[in-house]
Image: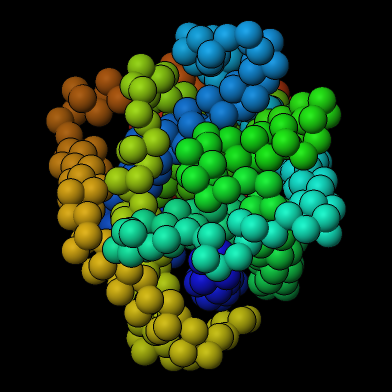
Amino acid sequence: MWVICAVISLFGALCYAELSTTFKKSGGEFTFILQAFGPLLAFLRMWTYLFIILPAVAIVQGNTIANYITAPFFNDCEEVPTHALRLMGMAVIFMLAFINAISVKLTTRLVNILTVAKTVGLIVLIISGLVYLAKGHTQYLNPENSFKMSLPLNIPLAIFAGIFAFDGWESVNTIVEEIKKPERNVPLGIVISLSAVTIIYLMANIAYFTLLSPAEILASNAVAADFSTKALGSWSWTIWVFVALSAIGNLLGNWLGLSRMFYVAAREGLLPSVVGMISVKHRTPIPSVIIVLPITLIYLMFDDVIALINYMLFVIVAFMALTVLIIPYYRWKHPNMERTLKLPLVIPIIFILVILFLMGLSVYTDPFSALIGTALTVAGIPVYFVGCVWNKPVWLQEKIVALNLILQKFFFVVPQEKEMVSESDDDADDKVSKSNGYRSGKEFEDVPLN
């Protein structure tokens, strides 16, 4: 199953690499869909991530981090108190938002360091599994002891979740303006990273089955922790640390990529203009980083946030298919368009057909989840027309301008302009007082953020 998900993800990642080197703008799926299909579909893509997916993922990963950090202090308890988990999770989320807000370089360096830590932790697990494999612990690797496909129609959900596990490649395309030589580094990075991740994931799963039965894996909330307890004994805490660091790196990287989507959406007039501005002091898009925090606080009150993510898996892969559809569409509509990377057309076609087949099977097996995910997405349509299309009365426009001005002064942010790089703080402060309202953002230069 991991191999199937890896191949599907590789096809999708290569397609995204072609699109990113064709459009050469940050924003990822949002930018691709905006250029090809217009603002409504692009807004819905941004809406699902801003109001549903990123807050839900932040809560789940924040709780995961908190669980691994606090669990060693509650050895004698049946479980870690819920309030302790939530408070620790929110503390982690706010800390990562702060890091993203003050420095892109610090964020990327931390992501790189934490990725290394995650890899080291997985290598420790793999080596432990190989040791037990050499000792003859193969009973759970035999086909007759493997998972029985009692619910074969759940395969679409499993593949969707597997693709979601490989989904980091999409974040690269959201920050393409900040990558040097994207036409070379984006596809190269995608191929190398996906290949390495696939091998590591496969080896780690083989290691798990040397000591854990299929039933234990299905019942576990933390497979790596359960395996490390059996394999490493008193040293199992090291794996807990590595898992926590891995989750921190994942959340930090997701936040970095998706905040740039919100930043680009504001530049295109689909979010308040202040969200598309950057800090005079830090040269980072602070409003687009922290805009998701209030929504995350609301989600903190709900217990089963992960169910919301499962509902949205259908929508996530639907937007993937729609995005990849741009490749054959643009080959037909703009045949002479410059393309640094040009894939064989069979790759996007295969990806689209596979995703459509899985979506159809998903609707057949679990129509309720698909319906909920679709309804949550469609709920953004009236918001789009009220916020972006409706010609607001003058008094309301004045209120919006005033609110934007207050937020600009509070965050000390300005529209990104080429000359801003060399201006003094006094000039920048003056620019804050002159900026106002909703803007399309197209008049500003697309220069990289530091």
Instruction: Relative to 293, say whether 175 is above or below.
Output: below
In the image, 450 versus 196, the foreground residue is 196
Instruction: Relative to 424, say whether 117 is above or below.
Output: below
Instruction: Relative to 182, say whether 11 is above or below.
Output: below
By what rule are the colours in the image chosen?
A: rainbow
Instruction: Relative to 138, say whether 277 is above or below.
Output: above
The residue at 63%/81% (across/down) is 340
The residue at 68%/40% (across/down) is 227
The residue at 58%/35% (across/down) is 222
Residue 361 as seen in the image, left or right of residue 234? left
Residue 239 as seen in the image, left or right of residue 52? right
In the image, 401 versus 56, the foreground residue is 56
Residue 351 as seen in the image, left or right of residue 427? left
The residue at 33%/38% (across/down) is 308
For the image, the number of numbered tags is 0
Q: Quadrant of the C terminus?
A: top right
The quadrant in which residue 190 appears is: bottom right
Q: Position of residue 26 (x, y in %)?
A: 55, 55
Tell me if residue 380 can be seen: no
Q: Position of residue 291 (x, y in %)?
A: 45, 29
Tell me if residue 202 can be seen: yes
Q: Position of residue 236 (x, y in %)?
A: 77, 30
